[in-house]
Image: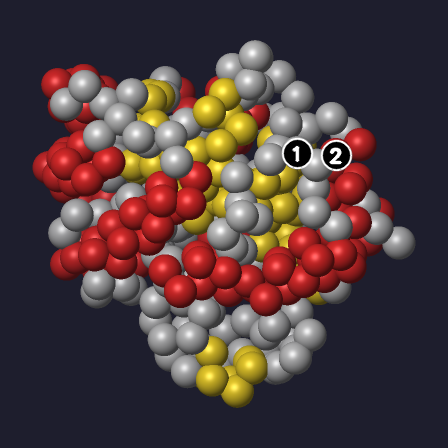
């Protein structure tokens, strides 16, 4: 892996220098992948986790700074261990032997060079899923063409003022829309296997924030207008005020049933296909454990 003098991997285009282990850019990460958890994950959408789980690889660091991030320990505090692309490829192999339905790369965009190198070493025989904040560079996404089978982006905000306040991205809405357009172009319509597990396609997640149902509904309007039924929509009610959310009184609580139902009813009125959640999902017990750090935990020696 080569160090980067002027990084333009994500939409921040910060042009930062990134060494092997540390960087000066928005994400503050080096070029060597840092991974916080690898293993079967059972709490994704039913068509992703199925009965055998999704083979999740959680990367440390992030290209956003969401004040409410449920994975705050890894996105902001950078908990994890450094691995090589070869070891990352070996993680895929080990996950496959555990029978998972897919390889699920969670927040990998700032390590795109290493991910591509890992695919040169070993391309998984099962679908590869790219689990994203939605804040992606189209240029970077095009490098992933024919390597990613399923895209799972967030579409967090319609209002860029909210995006800047809560995630540090003043241009989130237009960037996410362009990114999802590229994702859909690459994957086409949703395709399932005989067991109802997605093999190809794009699933867009909409996290409903307390006191911001209008914005969530505006996101749904945008999805309907631009993608129709070519994507699945997953409306998330799992919001828990973690990270720095306590500093923002308007989002320092879980959703009410009335708030969530209002957004779900709007999705139904738009005739969108997809998923909803039980509000019981708004519980910190569903946040993955990122405390393990031994090499054995990651399935390599």
Mark 1 or mark 2, whichever is nearer to me? 1
Quarter of the image that includes the C terminus: bottom right
277 displayed left or right of 290: left
| Residue placed under numbered mark 1 in the picture | 126
| Residue placed under numbered mark 2 in the picture | 96
For residue 167, the mark is: none
> How many marks can you see?
2
Seen in the picture, residue 131 relative to 75 is either above or below; the reply is above
Residue 246's spot in the image, x, y percent?
Answer: 31, 50
Label 1, residues with CA under 10 Å away: few <14, some 14-19, many ≥20: some
Q: Quadrant of residue 33?
A: bottom right
137 displayed left or right of 209: right
Does residue 61 show up?
no
Seen in the picture, residue 128 relative to 199 is either above or below; the reply is below
Residue 17's spot in the image, x, y percent?
Answer: 51, 85
Q: Quadrant of residue 121?
A: bottom right
Front-most of 36 and 90? 90
The colour scheme used here is: secondary structure
57 displayed left or right of 96: left
Residue at point 17% right, 48% down?
158
Residue at point 62% right, 81% down?
3
Q: Quadrant of residue 255?
A: top left
Residue 299's spot in the image, x, y percent?
Answer: 81, 45
Residue at point 52% right, 39% down?
149
Q: Are marks 1 and 2 in contact (CB under 8 Å)?
A: yes
Residue found farthest to the right: 301
Seen in the picture, residue 18 relative to 203 is either above or below; the reply is below
Q: CA distance from mark 1 to mark 2?
A: 8 Å
């Amino acid at each position: 892996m080569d160090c980067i003098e002027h990084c333009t991997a994500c939409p921040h285009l910060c042009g930062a220098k990134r060494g092997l282990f540390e960087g000066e850019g928005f994400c503050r990460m080096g070029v060597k992948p840092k991974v916080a958890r690898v293993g079967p994950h059972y709490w994704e959408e039913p068509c992703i986790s199925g009965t055998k789980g999704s083979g999740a690889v959680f990367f440390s660091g992030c290209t956003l700074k969401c004040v409410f991030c449920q994975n705050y320990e890894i996105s902001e505090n950078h908990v994890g261990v450094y691995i090589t692309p070869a070891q990352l490829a070996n993680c895929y192999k080990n996950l496959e032997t555990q029978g998972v339905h897919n390889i699920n790369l969670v927040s990998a965009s700032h390590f795109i060079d290493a991910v591509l190198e890992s695919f040169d070493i070993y391309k998984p025989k099962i679908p590869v899923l790219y689990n994203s904040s939605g804040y992606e560079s189209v240029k970077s996404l095009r490098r992933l063409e024919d390597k990613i089978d399923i895209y799972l982006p967030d579409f967090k905000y319609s209002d860029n003022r909210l995006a800047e306040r809560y995630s540090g991205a003043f241009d989130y809405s237009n960037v996410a829309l362009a990114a999802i357009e590229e994702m859909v172009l690459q994957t086409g319509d949703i395709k399932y296997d005989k067991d109802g597990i997605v093999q190809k396609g794009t699933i867009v997640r909409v996290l409903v924030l307390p006191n911001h149902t209008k914005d969530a509904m505006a996101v749904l309007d945008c999805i309907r207008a631009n993608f129709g039924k070519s994507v699945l929509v997953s409306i998330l009610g799992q919001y828990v005020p973690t990270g720095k959310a306590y500093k923002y009184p308007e989002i320092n609580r879980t959703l009410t049933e009335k708030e969530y139902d209002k957004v779900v009813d709007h999705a139904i009125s738009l005739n969108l296909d997809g998923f909803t959640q039980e509000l019981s999902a708004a519980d910190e017990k569903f946040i993955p454990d990122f405390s393990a750090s031994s090499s054995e935990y990651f399935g390599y020696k």
